[in-house]
Image (tube, grey):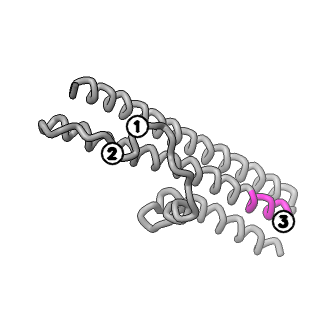
């Protein structure tokens, strides 16, 4: 009986890992596209000496920041589910009774909240938000230069 449970847990763990990986890859794609759009808009504004275009680049940075934040939140939720499964697998390996996660095994996750959103901007996640901060600062410098 425990063998069947552990096989289910391993399959669930693999599924959660793949989902987390997919959301992580999507987050990087969003970042790359966002920086590409930002660069193109900034280049256009610089070439044509049009400071109004820089304002549009601010919107682009914030939009892609929100999109990537959403993807990262989903990724972290699946990572947490994966950790719960790992605890159950560890129980099996230690010879304890296999305990399924309290919420069962499901790909459903809680809807990301504003708290989850704000947690993305904690100091320990600086590698996530710092590039966007740099883009915002550079954009503001270009806007102020042309005023």
Residues marked 2 and 1 touching at CB (< 8 Å):
no
Residue 69 place in picture, x, y as percent: 58, 54
Q: Is residue 25 left or right of residue 7?
A: right
Residue at x 45%, y 33% (from the top left corner): 18
Residue at x 67%, y 49% (from the top left corner): 34
Q: Which label sits on residue 105? A: 1
Residue 121 place in picture, x, y as percent: 52, 65
Residues marked 2 and 3 touching at CB (< 8 Å):
no
| Residue at the spot of label 2 | 84
Mark 1 to mark 3 CA distance (whole Å) = 52 Å
Q: Residues within 10 Å of mark 3 (few under 14, many from 20)?
A: some
Q: Nearer the viewer, residue 15 or 108?
A: 108
Above-or-below relation of 1 to 19: above
Mark 2 to mark 3 CA distance (whole Å) = 50 Å
Occupied quadrant, residue 29: top right
Residue at disc 3, secondary structure: helix
The stretch of residues the image draws in magenta is 52-59
Residue at disc 2, secondary structure: helix
């Amino acid at each position: 009986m425990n063998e069947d449970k552990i096989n289910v847990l391993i399959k669930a763990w693999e599924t959660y890992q793949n989902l987390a990986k997919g959301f992580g890859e999507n987050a990087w794609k969003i970042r790359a596209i966002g920086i590409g759009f930002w660069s193109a808009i900034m280049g256009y504004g610089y070439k044509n000496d049009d400071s109004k275009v820089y304002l549009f680049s601010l919107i682009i940075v914030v939009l892609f920041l929100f999109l990537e934040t959403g993807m990262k939140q989903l990724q972290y939720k699946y990572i947490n589910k994966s950790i719960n499964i790992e605890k159950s697998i560890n129980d099996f390996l230690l010879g304890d009774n296999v305990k399924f996660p309290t919420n069962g095994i499901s790909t459903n996750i809680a809807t990301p909240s504003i708290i989850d959103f704000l947690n993305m901007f904690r100091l320990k996640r600086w590698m996530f938000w710092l590039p966007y901060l740099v883009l915002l600062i550079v954009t503001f410098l270009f806007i102020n230069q042309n005023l």
